[in-house]
Amino acid sequence: MNRYRKRIVSALMSLLLTASPLMAYASEKAEPIVFEPVSEEELLRNDLAEIGENKLILIEDGQTDFTIVIPENASDPLREAAETLQNTLKQMSGAELPVVVENQLENAEHTIRLDEVFGTERPADEELADGYRLVIDNTYVSICGQTQVGTRNGVYAFIENQLGCLFLTPDDTYVPQHTTVCLVKADVADTPATLWRDVYAYETAQNHWAAKLRLNGIDVESDDTDKTIEQLQYEGWGTWCHDCYDYLSPDDYFDEHPEYFSEKKGERVYTYEGRDAYLCLSNPEVFEIVKNSLAEKIAENPDQLYWDFSGNDNYALAGCECAECKAADKAAGGTGMGTLLPFLNKLAKAFPDKYISTLAYLHTLKAPKNIKAEPNVVIKLCSMPGDQASSYLNGANKNASQFKEQVEEWSKITDKIVVWDYVVDFAHLLLPFPNFAVQAQNQKFYEDNNIIGVFHQASRENGGEFACLRAFVLSRLMWEGSSMDVAKCVSQYVTAYFGAAAPKILEYMNLCASELSAGDKTLGLYDGLFAHYKSYLSEENVRQYQDLIAEAKESVAGDAVLTGRVEEVELSVVYATVLLPEITEEERQTAVSRLKELCETHDISMVCEWESLDDFLANTLTATVASSQKALKRPYIIAVSAVAGVALLAAASVLIVKSVKKKKKKAG
């Protein structure tokens, strides 16, 4: 009998497990974060108006005799920074400080000196990079960097740190109001925690906002309105990524030299499954052509420091499959870096005064064995798969842990890594995406592992979820470092930007973050609402978000500016509502109408990286909701099947028992 019982119990357990709802992919909880409201008094920085012994009185009762002095050779970005300082002080106090070129100044008694004027020494410390030195003395303020870029950074830092302002968006700056402005005397050097810093987003490329955020990965000098966001990004790089055909083009070489290109299934190809293929890096002639091509590019743009050589973006093809390339990759541990990194090392030796970079991506993501990078080789490491709910520092789930291990392995090979991190939901740019909790720990992880640059890829489209806030926080982190209090930074920003609506906006953000943390889910760059339907995007939570946004709007009723800012957050909640699988069609259509209205008001045309709002509403929405509804029904169908199965097993067990008894009876 025991063996029959075991079989029955085993079968029942299998059915019950099958009947259970599909489990979420497990992970550790995200680090908790709480945004506390900031009082208006704290934001106002009333200490600025307090006269004291260790202070310089810059403006008193709206009057000043200070002059902003710039060098004769001041660049346009530095002049713009000086004008921003002038305008900020006027907006703050009513006092207008003239901006004067040094050789035209008659009275130099009280000055704000920008970039080595009146004998102020330029900082000699090479570690300053694009940092600066700030001196506040009895009669002057001096801001000076190793270069005018550093000085410009110092001016914008002075406006925020010393004057208490916040560069909230490309067009909005919070400026506290004080007719008297007093500065604590100081002599400090300030350097960025991360050498190369970029937040790839539509907003950072607008109105030179990137300069105010002290990013150096965006061309802040360009006034060319015809330039795309891609053309404005990647400052300092002559080439950026997926560019191997820029050096050796199939148009020029494939017909006569197919052996220069990747082999697949015994044939040489330059495209595969609709995408560009690769070069054959084991071919010595390929190296010579690429080297000569790079020399020409450098000659045309000698000021560019970084030059990239990377494979093309093709998920279906893992590099060249010729015997030589396959052998090199296998010897390196089964990674495409077995051919790519030695190729890069040779280029780096040929151009020792430049940094030669490449992408660790797809088949080249894994670090190679027994190969070290040359000192001037830079590895751009993509956070794949990555996670925005658990930090890379802790590696608390499979995705975060995998990227953590990749960085640690690469840091044994090179001391120059640029992390390419993905910080938004590319499939749903408007969906709530509460990833602020992990950012300080991620930054700490970067600081511990030879990360010289961070490329935070956000959305290239206008108006993503908390787009300006996210760019602001990430920019601050890359400059100030992991010791920065992210929760305080967010709270100050929200208070300054949303005014009386800030408490409800913070409450909404706290609820999103806590529900994500409680849900034990990864937060991926292509997650839909249904991936978090049992977590922070449940119908119950979305309805709470609706209530909080309604209260936020009510608190600023009559203020068109603040109402418009609250609507930016409402967009995300309405978008989530549209995707809810269990609401009535009437409610969905009401939400769709509101979504269209808000998108038109706020000039938003794209809801994901590859789909417009119109296409989404016409084609994708119905299928997405239907898929979610089907997934919701699946556990119940399985459960019904399980119940039927249990009944059959029970009946079978009775028959088995009866059969055993009959056999025993006959035997007796």
Image: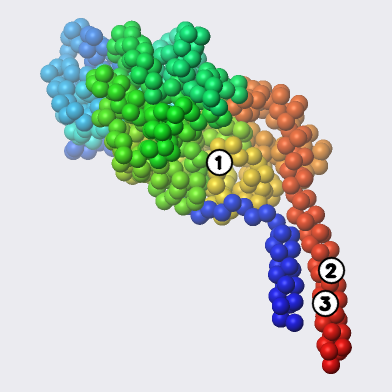
Total number of numbered discs in the rendering: 3
The quadrant the N terminus occupies is: bottom right
The residue at 49%/33% (across/down) is 362
Residue ranking furthest to the left: 119
Q: Where is residue 207, by image quadrant?
A: top left
Q: Which kind of residue does numbered mark 2 sit on?
A: Ala
In this rendering, does residue 468 appear at all? no
Residue found at x 25% / y 27%: 129
Can residue 639 be spotted in the picture?
A: yes
Rate crowding at label 2 as few (under 14), some (14 to 19) or many (20 or more) other CA atoms within 10 Å. Answer: few
| Residue 155 x %, y % | 30, 24
Query: On the image, numbered disc 3 is attached to which residue?
Result: 656
Q: Which of 583 and 107 is in front in this view?
A: 583
Q: Residue 647 carries which label?
A: 2
Residue of label 1: 524
- Of residues 519 and 16, which is closer to you in this image? 16
- Residue 197 position, x and y percent, is 37, 29
Which one is earlier in the sequence, the residue at label 2 or at label 3?
2
The residue at 77%/34% (across/down) is 622
Q: Which amino acid does label 3 sit on?
A: Ile
* 497 to the left or right of 141: right
Question: Could you give the CA–CA distance between mark 2 and mark 3, rounded to whole angstroms?
Answer: 14 Å
* Dot in front, 3 or 1: 3
Marks 1/2: CA distance? 41 Å
